[in-house]
Image: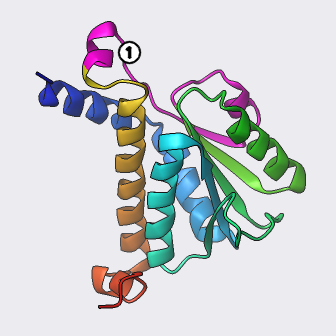
Amino acid sequence: MTQPDGLLENIRLAVGSVDPDSKESLIASILEKRKVFIYGSGRSGLVGQLFAVRLVQLGLDVHFVGEMTTPIIGKEDLTILISFTGKTSSVVQTAEIARHIGSETVCITGTASSPLTGTSDVSLIMEVPESEEIRKTAPLGTIFEDSALILFDIIVAEIMERKGISEQDMRYRHAIWV
């Protein structure tokens, strides 16, 4: 039987471990940049896509890297990269390309010293507890992915407050029109 209280507590601790100044830097960049590009692989990518949907509903110009309709990243843009290990080759390569172009790069990772943090302008590090017991109930980065989703939802709520955007405003940009 799983331990939901333990999972929830580990998620709370991981989200709470993110440096507030780094989170603020990400929010400021989201609000200042012309376009926002998001990329992650696997489940981290799915979390990034969920965040992208909310940012679009906030009225921002947002794209998920790798989609057929994604425009080229530019110097006035922000690229957000998500990888628990910070070693996922496609994520690191995307960060390197974006940075070479001149885009600001921000990563969300569980690994402070990694190739991804080395190529990112700002790193949001989540301290994710790991043990054999945790792996039994939350395998393969589950705590990181769930925590990243919660962090992104917190960021959405903060942007809503700062920009005076209501849920009704967001509903007008919702993909389901019925």
Q: In the figure, residue 140 lies in which quadrant?
A: top left
Q: Secondary structure at mark 1?
A: loop
Q: Is residue 49 above or below residue 86?
A: below
Number of residues whose C-alpha sits closer than 10 Å to that of mark 1, classed few (under 14), some (14–19) or many (20 or more) = few
Q: Quadrant of the N terminus?
A: top left
Q: Nearer the viewer, residue 20 or 100?
A: 100
**Residue found at the far front of this picture:** 68
- The answer to which quarter of the image holds residue 66 is bottom right
Where does the image place residue 51, in percent across and percent down from the top left?
46, 59
Work out whether residue 85 can be spotted. yes
Measured as percent of width and height from the top left, residue 147 is found at 37, 40
Location of the C terminus (image quadrant)? bottom left
In the image, 129 versus 176, the foreground residue is: 176
Horizontal arrangement in the rendering, residue 27 relative to residue 173 (left or right):
right
Residue 44 at x, y percent in the picture = 50, 43
Is residue 110 shown above or below 54? Answer: above
Residue at 22% x, 29% y: name it. Answer: 7
Q: Nearer the viewer, residue 37 or 140?
A: 140
The residue type indicated by label 1 comes to Glu
Check the image and name the residue furthest to the top: 132
Q: Quadrant of residue 88?
A: top right
Give the percent coordinates (x, y) of residue 27. 53, 59
Colour mode?
Answer: rainbow
Residue at coordinates 36% horizontally, 71% vertically from top-left?
161
Residue located beneath label 1 in the image: 130
Q: Is residue 17 left or right of residue 100?
A: left
Does the magenta-highlighted stretch encompass residue 138? no
**Span colored in magenta:** 110-136
